[in-house]
Amino acid sequence: MPIVAIDARDAFDPQLRGWGRYVRELIDALPPRAGLEYRIIAEGGRGPEALFEQVGLPLRLRREQADLVHAPNCFLPLARPCMGIVTIHDLAFEVFPGDFSKRTGWKYRTFTRRAARSAQRVICVSGYTAADVVRRYDVDEARVRIIPNAPSLPIGDEPAPDDGPYLLAVGDLRPKKNLLRLVEAFRALRAEGLPHHLVLAGVDSGPEAERVQAAAGGEPVRLTGYLSDARLDALMRGADALVHPSLYEGFGLVIVEAMARGTPVAAARATALPETGGDAAEYFDPLDVGDIAAAIRRVVGDRARHAQLAQLGRARAATLSWTVSAALTAAVYEETLG
């Protein structure tokens, strides 16, 4: 029986983020397949991660007698005893190298290109990322498969904040997330009489807070730092709109999480976001503060448009399912094994 090993270490991080959610949902939803056995690798070795990924993992695969390994976040072993599949979520480290530490950026730029070229199959989470990988890394598109993400944040019943209407953004202050332009747009809207405050989920206190408050000019902007799933869910359910001004996304999972809750979305007309949101979001030029403000105004100022986006968003999110995505992934395993 062929053995498929999955490097699932990110799924067991106590503070799950995008890639961790991807692999956790994947391994939970993978369907049983006649003739396939899954081996979940939950822990790495001591020392640098790259050492485990390029040396320790191949040794583990040999011991497990794996026929195929799936690396769900770029770092496929380049010298391996079996066939390999790699998932590439985005190439932000190529486009925004300053958003990454010197060591992390070096690791991604060193190994991702080689992993994409050596893999028997490359899974990308959007057509945008697939095209970027093919163009930038000269990968044969016949080896690339597009399998989208799906909402994964549990919908709970924790009460949403009740201290007045608010807009929500999720991210940090790395340049690609573009949150400072959003704060500038929010400041302009407040000057026009917008009653909302702005919540930035994921932005911490300290130097980041100082930059945000300087851009806000005294307007009400609240920073939450890292949030539990239950708290983030509650914030999403209670928001009048989720605004996602990111300059670069390989998928943009946060917008479909909001859509699943009936929260209207205003998003950047950039990279994969229009592909992910389809006709269920209001789009804007993320480099134009005035256009960001105008899109927010259309969402929260027009109740008919607000209700329409809520309905369209729920329908869009319902088209995405981890059951389907995991089945498509298992089919790629079978195809690769031949």
Image (cartoon, grey):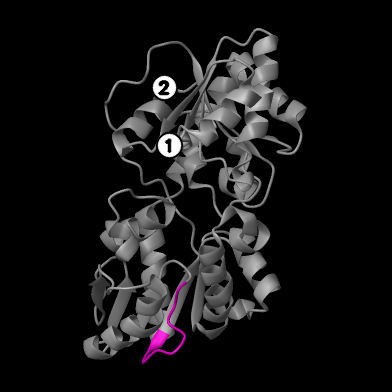
Q: Position of residue 249 (x, y in %)?
A: 59, 51
Real-space Cα distance between discs 2 and 1? 13 Å
Q: Position of residue 173 (x, y in %)?
A: 56, 40
Q: Quadrant of residue 286?
A: top right
Residue pictured at 48% horizontal, 28% vertical: 263
Quadrant location of the N terminus in the rendered image: bottom left
Residue pictured at 72% horizontal, 23% vertical: 294
* Dot placed on the residue nearer the N-terminal end, 2 or 1: 2
Could you tell me which secondary element the residue under label 1 belongs to? helix
Q: Range of the magenta residues? A: 75-83
Q: Position of residue 27 (x, y in %)?
A: 29, 63
**Do the CB atoms of the residues marked 2 and 1 lie less than 8 Å apart?**
no
| Three-letter code, disc 2 | Gly
How many residues crowd around disc 1 within 10 Å: few (fewer than 14), some, or many (20 or more)? many
Could you tell me which secondary element the residue under label 2 belongs to? helix
Residue holding disc 2: 238
Residue 315 vs 301, above or below: the answer is below
- Identify which residue, 125 or 49, lies in the foreground: 49
| Three-letter code, disc 1 | Ala
Q: Is residue 53 visible?
A: yes
Main structural element of the magenta stretch: helix, strand or loop?
loop
Residue pictured at 57% horizontal, 48% vertical: 276
Residue holding disc 1: 260
Residue 128 vs 200, above or below: the answer is below
Left-right relation of 270 to 227: right
Quadrant location of the C terminus in the rendered image: bottom left
Residue pictured at 41% horizontal, 60% vertical: 325
